[in-house]
Image: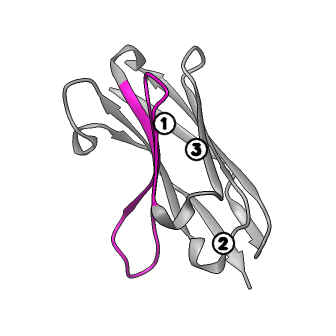
Amino acid sequence: QVQLVESGGGLVQAGGSLRLSCAASGSTRNIYAMGWYRQAPGKQRELVATIHSGGTTTYADSVKGRFSISRDSAKNTVSLQMNSLKPEDTAVYYCAVRPYYTDWSRGSWGQGTQVTVSS
């Protein structure tokens, strides 16, 4: 079991920046990928960005060129640098880990951190 603790959410004006961080503890040797998902009010949870153990990254089209995910495998942390934020980025952001040989649904999730972008 992996425990995740997120930090860095908050309120920012459109065009501003925020950095989210997530620290993993517990059974971290089994982590294959780390990532961020978000859920806006009335919408389904969606993938924002992921980074695999080899460094491969994926991004939602809506955040490409604005968000950047990074991972420190030695410290078991993952960060999401969010620039040029838009009101539509407002959501609860969740850190997640995916174990080897399985998918995200069988991984661990953080408690979520609120990001609010004002226009």
Disc 2 on helix, strand or loop? strand
Image quadrant assignment for residue 85: bottom right
Task: Return the residue nearer the eye: 45 or 81.
Answer: 81
Residue 74 percent across, percent down from the top left = 58, 14
What are the residue bounds of the magenta stretch? 32-60
Disc 3 on helix, strand or loop? strand
Residue to which mark 3 is pinned: 6
Residue 97 percent across, percent down from the top left = 39, 35
Q: Residue at x 50, y 28 (%)?
A: 24
Label 2 vs 1, first from the N-terminus: 1
Q: Are marks 3 and 1 in contact (CB under 8 Å)?
A: yes
Task: Return the residue nearer the eye: 2 or 64.
Answer: 64
Q: How far is mark 2 from mark 3, CA to CA?
A: 16 Å
As drawn, the label of residue 116 is: 2
As drawn, the label of residue 42 is: none
Q: Residues within 10 Å of mark 3 (few under 14, many from 20)?
A: many
Side of 49 where 70 appears, left or right: right
> In the image, is residue 10 part of the stretch drawn in magenta?
no
Amino acid residing under circle 2: Thr
As drawn, the label of residue 4 is: 1
Q: Residue furthest left?
A: 101
Side of 29 where 21 appears, left or right: right
Task: Return the residue nearer the eye: 9 or 18.
Answer: 18
Q: Work out whether 80 lies above or below 114.
A: above
> In the image, is residue 33 part of the stretch drawn in magenta?
yes
Q: Most prominent secondary structure in the magenta stretch?
A: strand
Q: Work out whether 55 lies above or below 85.
A: above
Amino acid residing under circle 3: Glu
Q: Work out whether 91 lies above or below 53.
A: below
Q: How far is mark 3 from mark 1, CA to CA?
A: 7 Å
